Amino acid sequence: MYNEITKASNIVSMEIDDKFSKSSRNKTIARSCLTLCKEWSMIKENALDGFTRSQAKKSCKKYVKENLKEEVAGNFLVSILFSFIVKLIIEWVIQNYIKRLLK
C-alpha cells in the first residue's frame, strides 16, 4: 500500500504544480493539504481497502481540516474570503488524491 500512497502523492503534487502559480499562497496551502492527505493515508493504511471513495474522502477531509488550521490563520477580514478559497483547495486536493489512491 505504501507504493500506492507514494504514487498518488507524486501525481497530485505534479497536478498542484500545474494548477497553481509558483509563489502563490494557494499552492502552499495545497501542498500542506497534500502532506496531510499522505499522513492520513499512512495512518489509515490498513483500513483503506475497506473504505469506499466517499468514506475515504470524508475521513481524509476531517483529518485535513483538523490539522490545517495553522496554515490558514490570518486576520479576520482576509480569513472570511480566504476560508472559502481554502475549502475549494481542500476539496480539489482530496478529490484528486483519493481518486488516485483508490483506483
Image: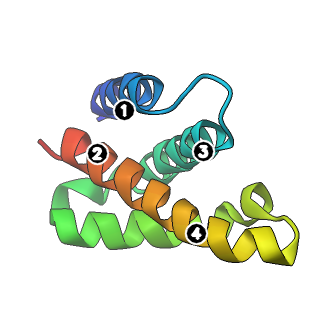
Residue that badge 3 annotates: 26
Disc number lying in front (1 or 3): 3
- Percent across and percent down for residue 78 are 77, 68
Mark 4 residue element: helix
Q: Residue at x 25, y 42 (%)?
A: 101
Mark 3: give few (<14), some (14-19) or many (20+) Cα within 10 Å. Answer: some
Label 2 Cα crowd, 10 Å radius (few <14 / some 14-19 / many 20+): some
Mark 2 and mark 1 lie on one chain; the one further toward the N terminus is 1
What's under tag 1, amino acid-wise?
Val
Mark 1 vs mark 3: which is more N-terminal? Answer: 1
Q: Is residue 53 left or right of residue 14?
A: left
Measured in 3D between alpha carbons, the distance from the residue under mark 2 to the one under mark 1, in whole angstroms, is: 7 Å
The structure residue drawn at horizontal position 67% and vertical position 60%, both measured from the top left corner, is 68
Quarter residue 55 falls in? bottom left
Q: Nearer the viewer, residue 12 or 77?
A: 77
Residue type marked 2: Asn
Q: Are marks 3 and 4 in contact (CB under 8 Å)?
A: no
Proximity of marks 1 and 3: CB atoms separated by less than 8 Å? no
Q: Is residue 95 above or below residue 15?
A: below
Disc number for residue 12: 1
Q: Which mark, by number, is residue 65?
A: 4
Residue identified by numbered label 2 = 96
Measure how far apart labels 4 and 1 are at the Cα level. 18 Å
Query: Does residue 10 appear left or right of residue 55 in this picture?
Result: right
Q: Please tell me which of labels 4 and 1 falls first in the chain.
A: 1
Q: Is residue 48 above or below residue 74?
A: above
| Observer-nearest of 67 and 86 | 86
Question: With 50 as the anchor, is 80 left or right in this view?
Answer: right
Q: Nearer the viewer, residue 77 or 17?
A: 77
Image point 11% across, 41% down: which residue? 103
Among numbered discs 2 and 3, the one appearing first in the sequence: 3
